[in-house]
Amino acid sequence: MITIISGTNRPGSNTLKLAKHVEEIYQSLEEETTLIDLGAMPAELYLPEAYKEKPEAFIPYRDSVLNARGLVVLVPEYNGSYPGALKYFIDMLPFPQAFENRCVAFIGIAAGQWAGLRPVEHMQGVFGYRNALIYPKRAFFGSAYELFDGEGELQDMDVHDRLENQAKGFLEFVSALKD
């Protein structure tokens, strides 16, 4: 199973739209997927007590990470880095087993010209610290507000092709490291 993490809790985000497209690609490659939408996280997760005792509603999210063969993290750029909601989600996951020797691929998305490069590089440091196996072929997409039509459908087949190529390579990476 590949778990896809939409790295923001912003309502109506382009990151979630892109994550849904990524999920469709993995499913077309006959891979089981789970999509984590940080906007759907249980509200009680944000209580201070959650650091010590995770709410029961968080268990499916935790298990989606722990049971994944690989993680695909979509990282939007917020103020030159990744969103606080994504960092908090990571902080809530068990240490070290959440990322230890787990394959991870990154997709950056931003409104600006740098296409999410900075937040992905910051995330690589976090995941590297947690001993994740980082897939080196990252994908970056700028002009996020122009990627989708009014119904949330991807406009550019080049974007689709780049995501599909990354997915195929990542599945080979996961298989090679897990075998």
Image (cartoon, grey):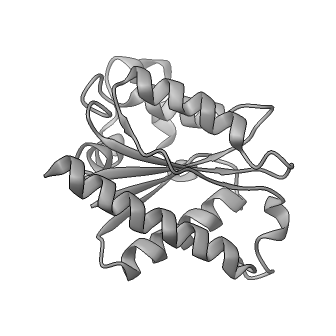
Q: How many marks?
A: 0
Q: Nearer the viewer, residue 28 or 49?
A: 28
| Residue ID at (48%, 44%) | 136
**Residue at x-position 33% and y-position 26%:** 131
Front residue of 21/138: it is: 138
Q: Toward which corner of the image does residue 96 lie, by quadrant? A: top left
Identify the residue shown where x is 62% and y is 65%: 18
The answer to whether 57 is drawn above or below residue 45 in the figure is below
> 2 above or below 134?
below
Instruction: Residue at 71%, 45% (x, y): give it.
Output: 116
- Horizontal placement of 157 versus 90: left or right? right
Residue 169 vertical placement versus 76 (above, below): below
- Please name whichever residue, 46 or 15, is drawn nearer the observer in this view of the structure: 15
Q: Quadrant of the N terminus?
A: bottom left
Q: Is residue 25 visible?
A: yes
Res. 153 in view: no
Residue 129 vs 73, above or below: the answer is above
Left or right of 120? Residue 44 is: left
Where residue 162 appears, x then y in whole percent? 59, 68
Q: Say whether residue 56 is left or right of residue 84.
A: left
Residue 143, image x, y percentages = 84, 59
Instruction: Please identify the residue farthest to the left as the structure is shown.
Output: 179
Q: Position of residue 112 (x, y in %)?
A: 86, 49
Where is residue 19, by image quadrant? bottom right
- Percent position of residue 132, x then y: 35, 33
